[in-house]
Structure formats: structure tokens, C-alpha cells
Image (cartoon, grey):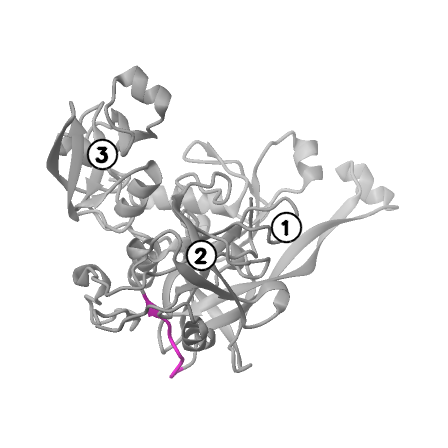
Amino acid sequence: LLSATTSIATIKVYEKRQYNADYFSPTAKDEIPMRFASMSDTEIGSTDLTYAAERTVHSVVHVKVKQEVKNSIQEFGDPFFDFFFGQPRSFQQPEATTGAGSGVIISTDGYIVTNNHVIDNAAEIEVTLNDKRTFKAKVIGTDPSTDVALIKIEATDLQLITIGNSDNLKVGEWVLAIGNPFNLTSTVTAGIISAKAREMSGVITSERKIESFIQTDAAINPGNSGGALVNTAGELVGINTAIASQTGSYIGYGFAIPTTIVSKVVRDLKDYGIVQRAVLGVKIANINDKLAKDKNLKTMDGAYVDDVVSNSSAKDAGIKQGDIIVAINDVRIKSVAELQEQVAAYRPGDNINVTVNRNNKEITLRVTLKNSSKNTNIVKAVDMDRLGATLEPLSIQTKQRLNYNGGLLVDEVQRGGLFAKAGIYKGFIILKINNKTVSSVKEVKDIYTEALNSE
């Protein structure tokens, strides 16, 4: 399974569509002015894909990133230095690396959705529109758990894409994958929806990953990541994110993040800078033949509740071990991936109806969702600048010399920052924060976020 600069495709149904107006309609004055599919009487019945291509190709952009990697360079032949420090002198020499992917314009004033892995750790992001105009982009927010990122360019009157409802997709439906594979701009490929709610372990490496991909056989290749998967009506139904391949190139399987997840993540990143993730508070498993026999289950559909976390949303609502979750707000659930996808569309504090199969009878429970801290508070975004420090991973030589497995070197400290106030200065090595070993800036950010949002 490959992610990074890869892509995928997804689709939409050829029929009159019914949408959840409360979910897809903007609710705040500062909402990103996305264009969502409306309930129209337009019949999309043919397999002519030219309309969808013409309607969407100008909404897909080429995203180029530049990263600066510091390589350790050693110098030899200084006896004075070697005598006092016992090792050759070394210094960090910056080396620029580049990468590329795709993105999708979702507002006329420059908001663009792409993959987190496309822009992760980027020192500079450049966006090229289909009309060849180029802009510098800034990161608004990222969500490694879903591999979604929101960036913005300073531009107006852009052609945004219409966002459709991926819940309405049907297996066998035609879709287009639009992106920039191998730096070939504005490339369109066609295929069908091969499957929905795919779990692809290894595509997303976040601890709390959410995997409910749309699978398509539309040809996608490195560079398509972050591009659009659209239906024949020209509506966005997914963001291309990965391919399954042993060669690194297309062999028939691609995966996209459904818009049910993307739309919620984008709104949170724009409004809060961080995703407000709801947690049901259950340990769940897919039902297979062995589990069904062991537990004497009469259905193979749904997510089996193996355990319920104390003080969780599920516990408060009366969900019990042995229940099978079969629907969220009347949307039927067949697997763990589908359950994750539905819950990911809500925020802590939202109320949802959860239907469970208990002793072969279905009952519906009202659940008030909580966050991972087991409350309904809004999670605050971390401002790493408040630390007032530049941190660098320790070199392999330093780790070996000091016998450390992790650690971060404090390369620079600004006056007035939290590090300076705590008496931490340049040259310090940070080994643990809150008794947790750290070896990357991301780990520091995660611990800082947890501490900031703890009760």
C-alpha cells in the first residue's frame, strides 16, 4: 500500500439525490463558501463523462512542496577539538527535497483540500492552477488521522468544485479521478466504484486512524494524491489518497477519502484549526463466521461491541458489551469502517441515534458524543510558537555517544517563550515531557495538545 503522492477515485449515483440539508449546508457566517450539491431534478443517466470533466478539471490544482532536510556532515583533522570532545566536529547542512501532489479548490477565495501526507513537514508550498497561475500556499490545518489537510492561497474568483454526498455512491457507478500524476497536469481517468468502506491497514499511520475508503479502478498514480474523485454529475465524492501496488504505479486499485469525512474535517480545520473528533467509547470488531459462531450471533452485519469504555458516550447511553451496532441516525452499518465513517461526521456534544441489535432485537439509543478526554468541550489547537524554541532531532552519532534512544536538541530559544520561562536554553536536550519520551517535534505537539485539553 502506497501513500504520499498517490491518488484515487470515487463516484456518485445517476438518480435524483436527497441530501441531509442540516449536514451539508453552511451553518456559520464565516463558513468556507463551498458549493454543495443541491436537490435538483437533473437526470444524470448517461455514461458520457465529458460534462463531469469539463465541470471539474479547473477546480483541481497541482501542489508542489519543498522540504529542508538537515544532514550531518563531519570534519576531521582537528586534534584540539577531538581532545576536548572526543569526536570529530560535525555540523548540519540543509538539503532541499521536493515532492508533488494534487489539491481541490473548495472556495472561491482560495481554500484548497489536499492530503496531509502531500504537505507534511513542507517548508514551502506552491500551488499551480489549471490556467498555469502560481501561488504560494499556507497551511490552515492538518488531520493525520484522516490524511486530510486544508491549505489556502491568496486568490479570488476561483472555480470551486461542487461537493456531493458520498453516502449515495453505489458500487458499479462511474467516476473520474482528476489530478497530476507524474507531474502531468490536469489528467483525467475514468473507472467505477469498486467497493465502499474499505479498511486499508498501513495507508494512514496515525494512532487514531479512520479508515473507510472508497475503492475505484480509475487509473491513479503517484502525484494524484489530494486530487478529486467525482461522479458523472461533476460532484466531488472523494479525495484521492492511496493506491495498492507492489510497483509504485497503478495496477487497478485506488482509494479515496469519502466526502462525508472530508467535509466535516475541513469545517473543523477552518473554524478551530484542529478536528473536533467525537468518540463513541467502544471497542469494536467486524463480525466474521468464527465470531458469529462463538457468540451465537444471528447476523453478520454491523460492528460487534467487545467492550464499553467507562464514563464514555456509549456507557452513558446504555450500550452494552455484546451489542451489535447496526445503524447511526438510520444509516445502516455493516462494518467497523462504516461505523467509523458515520461517527467521524459529528462533533463532541452532538446527539445521535445509535441502533443496536441486542439479543436479536433492535433497539435505538440516544447518545451524546464526547471527545477523547470524555467530555464535550471544544478541543483547542496548539500554537507551537508559544514554546519559543526550535527543536531538532538528535543525530545518530549523538544518540550513540550519549546512549539515548530519543531526544530533541534545543537549537534556539526566544525570550518570552514557555521554554525560556522554564529555564530551558539553547543546547539543552529534551528527553521526556510529562514522563513521555520524545524524539520528534510531532511527539512534542501531541503531548502539548493533550496537556492543553486535559481537564
Tell me, for residue 325, which label it has, or none: 3
Q: 271 above or below 419?
A: below
* Residue occupying the point 31% across, 30% down: 284
Q: Secondary structure at mark 3?
A: strand
Q: Amino acid at mark 2?
A: Ile
Indicate the position of residue 38 as horizontal and vertical percent values.
23, 70
> Disc 3, disc 2: CB below 8 Å?
no
Q: Point out the residue furthest to the front here.
A: 46
Q: How far apart are the two marked residues, 1 and 2, measured between alpha carbons?
A: 21 Å
Earlier sequence position, callout 1 versus callout 3: 1
| Location of mark 2 (residue) | 192
> Disc 1, disc 2: CB below 8 Å?
no
Q: Secondary structure at mark 1?
A: loop
For the question of whether residue 14 can be seen, the reply is yes
Q: What is the magenta segment's predominant secondary structure?
A: loop
In the picture, measured across the screen, residue 341 lies left or right of residue 218, that is left
Earlier sequence position, callout 3 versus callout 2: 2
In the picture, measured across the screen, residue 256 lies left or right of residue 331, that is right
Q: Nearer the viewer, residue 382 or 349?
A: 349
Q: Is residue 162 magenta?
A: yes
Q: Amino acid at mark 3?
A: Ile
Which stretch appears magenta? 156-163
| Location of mark 1 (residue) | 248
Earlier sequence position, callout 1 versus callout 2: 2
Mark nearer the viewer, 3 or 2: 2
